[in-house]
Amino acid sequence: MRQSFPPRRSWLESIGVYRHPRVLGMLFLGFSAGLPLLLVGGTFSAWLSDSGVRLAAIGFLSWVGIAHSIKVLWAPVVDRLPLPVLSSWLGRRRAWMLFAQSVVAAGLLGMALTDPREALWLVAVWGVMTAFGSATQDIAIDAYRVEAVSRDRQGAMAASYVLGYRVAILTAGAGALYVAGFADWNVTYTLMAVLMGVGMVTTLIVREPETAVDRVTLNLEQRVAEYLAATADTGFRRDFNAWFIGAVVCPFADFFKRFGMASLLILAFIATFRISDIFMGVLANPFYLELGFTKAQIGTYSGVFGLIVTLTGVGLGGVLVARYGIMRLLLFTAFMAPATNLTFSWLAGLGPEIYGLVIAIIADNLTGGMAVAVLIAYMSSLTNTAYTATQYALFSSLMTLPGQFMGGFTGVLAEQVGWGWFFVSSALLGIPAILMAFLIARVAHPDFIRRPGMQNGPVASEGEKGGPTGAGH
């Protein structure tokens, strides 16, 4: 596939992209997207551990968050189906964002009003509701992020999103642990439900993005329209076929048409990229607690300090991508992300020493921040703005699904082999990603190795007006 590479901006022009109103708005939407993640993940595990729930049960309950890994199943609905009243008032992206944010807030409040020692099953139900609302919000926000600005501002949008997301991680991680330390977990989750108001207010303020489609996409949907015109189906059946083909078939047909056989390689690479990181992260807080660190220490070093290191990694990743190209950074982070898991194995043998915790967090969060920024920009570049929600949901679902599924067995593995070998095992899970990274660089994106920067796929410029046409719109 032919690549085109836009001219580089000056340093002042590059910094100036952060003044764009939609880039600023993405900071708060990123906060709204990141807030629920730990509340059904790491913080949820800490709450259950603090309440006396067994490690094996905590590991299996991590499957609550698997909604983020299967969101591609209902992404076509979010992409094309209007919500009564809300869609006509706010537009298709903002309507789904507001609806999903309301579901998350309700789920968190339900968790706050339930005691896991008395009704663990009900906590799980509320957690599933929160996770599905959070995953739906991710679909809508990811689509908005890709569509709201031109391709040359996607790096700034990703950085702003990650910053807001990481502040939310700090809030739902360290902040939640601080509150739980002097109050209780029910108060903590009530406060988190209230903080979802940040996303709701932002959704009401930002403008709905305008999108345009390229000629290849128009031709694809024109063929669908011609097929529907020739079919004998009428009424509801014809309308459903039109929606299904436009919302479900076309997004995947477009992706495979643009990348050919390399499509399977790209999807396999995305699926393997974060297995090691997600697998390890499920039991990070229980590991800290069992090792002997206090909640305050975990909040300070894993939360506050960890956020600073992660954001440093995000910024460094953006600079290095501009200088060396995205595939080189994907190769580097594919290796470093699992390799740094070994520092936690070392920490397990060292014991509750602050300097050991600091070293492990620096190694893990620095490379993790770089990996997140690089991967978001890469996946965004693969989408077609006519099918943003569905295609990006496919990528982000594959990114987390293997790790989320395998994460359900982390508690059993840790109980059987101990913490040291648990983290060694998590590092070994990163080997397929390393091999896939080299293969994808040679087969799917050889131009990214030779030239820094990237401009990929059929993308409309910000000045183009109009909306997607054809079947299903």
Image (cartoon, rainbow, N blue to C red):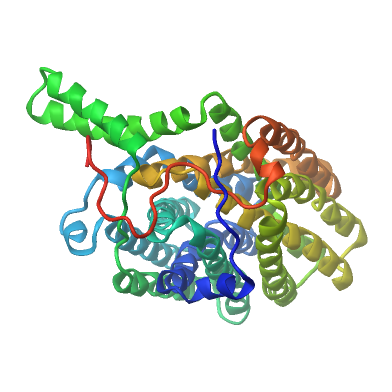
Relative to residue 39, is residue 282 depicted above or below? Answer: above
The total number of labels drawn is 0
Residue 93 pos. (x, y %): 31, 57
Residue 222 pos. (x, y %): 24, 30
Q: Quadrant of the C terminus?
A: top left
Left or right of 179 in this view: 317: right
Q: Which of 186 and 141 is in front in this view?
A: 141
Left or right of 250 in this view: 260: right
Q: Quadrant of the N terminus?
A: top right
Residue 462 pos. (x, y %): 38, 59
Q: Which of 363 and 252 is in front in this view?
A: 252
Q: Which residue lies furthest to the right in this view?
A: 350
Q: Residue furthest left?
A: 235
Residue 424 pos. (x, y %): 83, 44
Is residue 91 visible to us here? yes
Q: Nearer the viewer, residue 111 or 273?
A: 273
Q: Which residue lies furthest to the bottom in this view?
A: 182
Relative to residue 44, is residue 20 depicted above or below? Answer: below
Residue at 61% in and 47% down:
57
Left or right of 467 in this view: 397: right
Is residue 410 visible to us here? no
Residue at 79% in and 51% down:
341
Residue 311 placement: quadrant? bottom right
Residue at 46% in and 76% down:
191
Relative to residue 202, is residue 405 depicted above or below? Answer: above
Residue at 57% in and 65% down:
159
